[in-house]
Image (cartoon, rainbow, N blue to C red):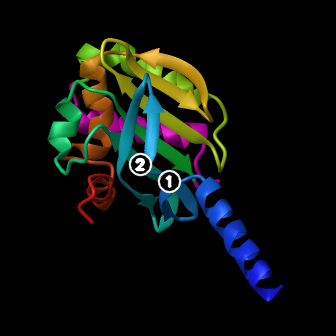
Amino acid sequence: MKKALTTGFASLVMTALLSAPAAALTVEGVDVPDTYSTMDTELKLNGAGTRSKWFMDLYVGGLYVPETIDDGEAVINADEPQAITLHIISGMITSERMTEATLEGFEASTDGDMASIQEDVDQFMAVFEEEITEGDVFDLVYLPGEGVRVLKNGEHKDTVGDLAFKKALFGIWLSDKPAQKDLKEKMLGQR
């Protein structure tokens, strides 16, 4: 009887472990999946970290690529499926603050020259007009020949730009002037 209970319990534990969604890591309580599927392509989690400002954790950012890489410029310039996910973990992020911070990021990643992508930036920023609350998830998915699909909580909101826009957008986190240096390093799997 005891052996049957032990075997049954072990079987139950194994079933639970095998049926649980695979999470590559947990960052600030957010389970960051180890893969991201898009357009018949499975992307791998390259790395994830927390965006903080003034000692407050704001969101968890994850980078998904076809093959792991630790070179930010190579990611920015690659014309291949890639994704960045942003898991909002603070009630301090509002639509206004997200818009302001993202525009600052575009300024930095383009060295202040957004003229060639200004229409795309304006179109992209409209996604942040809706209220943003803790627990929201934004997926920024680049697909060659299509542009950047923008999803909020799994719902497709818009598709924006081309490779030039993607370079500026991904540059917010991965350029030589990233939103936060240690977040860039973690997204690139360097720490």
Residue 104 included in the magenta stretch of the image: yes
Type of the residue with mark 2: Gly
Q: Name the residue under label 1.
A: 32
Q: Where is residue 46 in the image (x, y as percent from the top left)?
A: 32, 50
Name the image quarter holding residue 79. Answer: top left
Type of the residue with mark 1: Val
Left or right of 72? Residue 154 is: right
Q: Which of 151 and 82 is in front in this view?
A: 82
Q: Position of residue 122 (x, y in %)?
A: 43, 19
Q: Mark 2 touching mark 1, by CB under 8 A? A: yes
Q: Name the residue under label 2.
A: 62
First reached walking from the N terminus: tag 2 or tag 1: 1
At 59% from the left and 37% from the top, the residue drawn is 95
| Eye-nearest disc, 2 or 1 | 1
Report the predominant secondary structure element of the magenta stretch.
helix
Q: Nearer the viewer, residue 62 or 103?
A: 62
Left or right of 135? Residue 84 is: left
Residue 46 included in the magenta stretch of the image: no
Left or right of 81? Residue 20 is: right
Q: Position of residue 191 (x, y in %)?
A: 27, 66
At 16% from the left and 40% from the top, the residue drawn is 73
Circle 2 SS class: strand
Quadrant position of the N terminus in the picture: bottom right
- Residue 20 visible in the picture: no
Magenta span of residues: 89-113
At 57% from the left and 22% from the top, the residue drawn is 156
Q: Using the image, determine if residue 24 lies above or below residue 171.
A: below
Q: Nearer the viewer, residue 88 or 39?
A: 39
At 55% from the left and 25% from the top, the residue drawn is 127
